[in-house]
Amino acid sequence: MNLTKNFTLHEMTKSETALRQGMANDPSQTEIDNLRTLCEKVLQPVRDHYGKGVKVNSGFRHPLVNAKVGGSTTSDHCKGFAADIEIPGVANADLAQWIKDNLQFRQLILEFYTPGVPDSGWVHVSYDPNDLKNQVLTATKQNGKTVYLPGLVA
């Protein structure tokens, strides 16, 4: 099932964790609708701008799958609002900056990016049409703990 021209429901719900654990990762119709909106408002515009495939590392996560990967119990992934993405050949810091400058979103996080290593980390982006607060953060490890810094720190 296509959600947009370049994004399918399959790629937005695939999960190696779910496969390995023999777990279902099936979204409800509401969550599918949320994934479609995320694709329409964020992922497809990113794909159209760069003219390259967008790799979805993680999209929808059933709450049980989310728990297995150590995700927050309030994660937007569980509602179909979020995806972790990369574009091969595009620095994740540049991708995050383009999204920040050109699109609306709920939350944008440049996660575990190492300056000078363009393909390090990934970009988390969420879209909730009822909560477009455009929050921008950078996630990094400090003393073994994840710390969220305001803005894009690259």
Image (cartoon, helix red, strand yellow):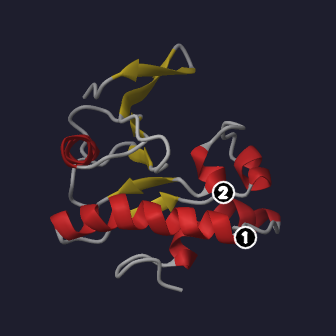
Identify which residue, 15 or 116, lies in the foreground: 15
Identify which residue, 139 or 107, lies in the foreground: 107
Is 33 placed above or below 69 here? below
Is 3 placed above or below 75 here? below
Around disc 1, counting alpha carbons within 10 Å, would you say few (fewer than 14), some (14 to 19), or many (20 or more)? some
Mark 1 or 2 closer to N-term? 1
Which image quarter: residue 4? bottom left
Would residue 14 be visible to someone looking at this image?
A: no
Q: Residue 2: where, in percent of width, then height?
A: 47, 83
Q: Which residue is mark 1?
A: 26
Q: Is residue 119 left or right of residue 7?
A: left
Identify which residue, 145 or 139, lies in the foreground: 139
Would residue 49 be visible to someone looking at this image?
A: yes
Residue drawn at point x = 39 percent, y = 42 percent: 121
Residue drawn at point x = 80 percent, y = 63 percent: 21
Instruction: Name the kind of residue labelled 1 in the image.
Output: Asp
Instruction: Name the kind of residue labelled 2 in the image.
Output: Arg
Quarter that holds the N terminus: bottom right
Around disc 2, counting alpha carbons within 10 Å, would you say few (fewer than 14), some (14 to 19), or many (20 or more)? many
Q: Secondary structure at mark 1?
A: loop
Q: Is residue 99 left or right of residue 77?
A: left
Is 153 placed above or below 41 here? above
Q: Which residue is mark 2?
A: 61
